[in-house]
Image: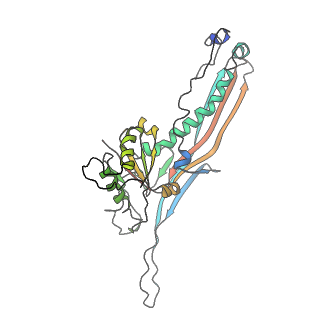
Amino acid sequence: MGSPLTQRAFTRLLDERLSEVFYENHGSDLDENIMTLFNVKTSSKAWEELFGMGDIPDFEEHVGTLNYNSVYPGYHTKVEHKEFSNGIQIERKLIDDELYDVVEGRSARLGEAARRTKEKYGCRPFAYAFSTSYDFMTSEEGVALCSNSHTTKASGVSTTTGFDNYGTSAFSPVALEATRIAGNKFKSDIGERMDMNFDTIIIPDDLYEDAWEVMESAGKIDTDNNNRNFHKGRYNLLVYRRLSDYDVNNWFLVDYNKMKQSLYWYNRIPTEFMNTTDFDTFIRKYAGYFRISYGWKSWRWVFGHEVS
């Protein structure tokens, strides 16, 4: 438990000779991508459950009798909200005697800390895209978001092709095009090709220059010929700076519309703030609380590269 802010620790705030008192402000302008990446929803339940229905096979030539086909269930995913809290304590005497009206202002920074905490979790579907250590989910399929081991419940369907959204290639024009082609060959649960539109690149800050060159150069990268650059103007670019805290080489290609249909963020309890004064010590207490979760109902919107 953190110690209260006291006169002894902040005695300088009683000195009228100070020319300026300022807040240390870390991370307030860093990525705010939850609204950009997730389908953000409110929740009124202790947990949310996601369950998909499978694809419907092709029509067949009618030869006098209707042929009824099977539709298979998808995988079940449970997303359970977790509680988050934070607080600070301030000595009554310090509030009374400090001269710069900044001490109680520290409580307002709880809002910034709450936003930052949420955004860090918003980064984690990508930061841990190659892991089954889920933050909030219980997945029936039980594989990573980006994996070469995806399965299906549809009977007799081969997963040899169209069920792999995991790669290890460093970012380059060649790797980008190979990823686009592989993603466009994703298959549904019954092995049917899907209508994919991989239109967004997500990278850490360390790959910004490489990605910018691929997207903006008029000619092909690192060649002596005068051929046009196939990738110019083809993709949207999201430079996700928080990804650099986890890995500086991993990158992702996504179908943005399908991502917004599949990647969910739940606000069970929006950030609440409260304060009270301890009757025995007169210490002022400030606290914040929220409940959140995230999860996905399908992997068929992203292709990720875990680069060694």
Foreground pick, 209 / 268 = 209
Foreground pick, 91 / 107 = 107
Figure quadrant of residue 103? top right
Q: Quadrant of the C terminus?
A: top left
Foreground pick, 149 / 27 = 27
Q: Is residue 148 visible?
A: no
Exactly how many numbered labels are in the figure?
0
Q: Quadrant of the N terminus?
A: top right
Q: Is residue 70 positioned above or below 61 on the image?
A: above
Identified at 75% across, 21% down, the residue is: 279
Q: Please identify the residue farthest to the front as the structure is shown.
A: 226
Q: Please identify the residue farthest to the left as the structure is shown.
A: 224
Image location of residue 302, percent across then percent down: 42, 54
Identified at 40% across, 62% down, the residue is: 152
Identified at 46% across, 88% down, the residue is: 65
Is 64 positioned to the left or the right of 22 in the image?
left
Q: Is residue 141 positioned above or below 33 on the image?
A: below
Image location of residue 81, percent across then percent down: 57, 45
Image location of residue 49, percent across then percent down: 55, 55
Foreground pick, 186 / 266 = 186
Figure quadrant of residue 213? top left
Q: Is residue 10 visible?
A: yes
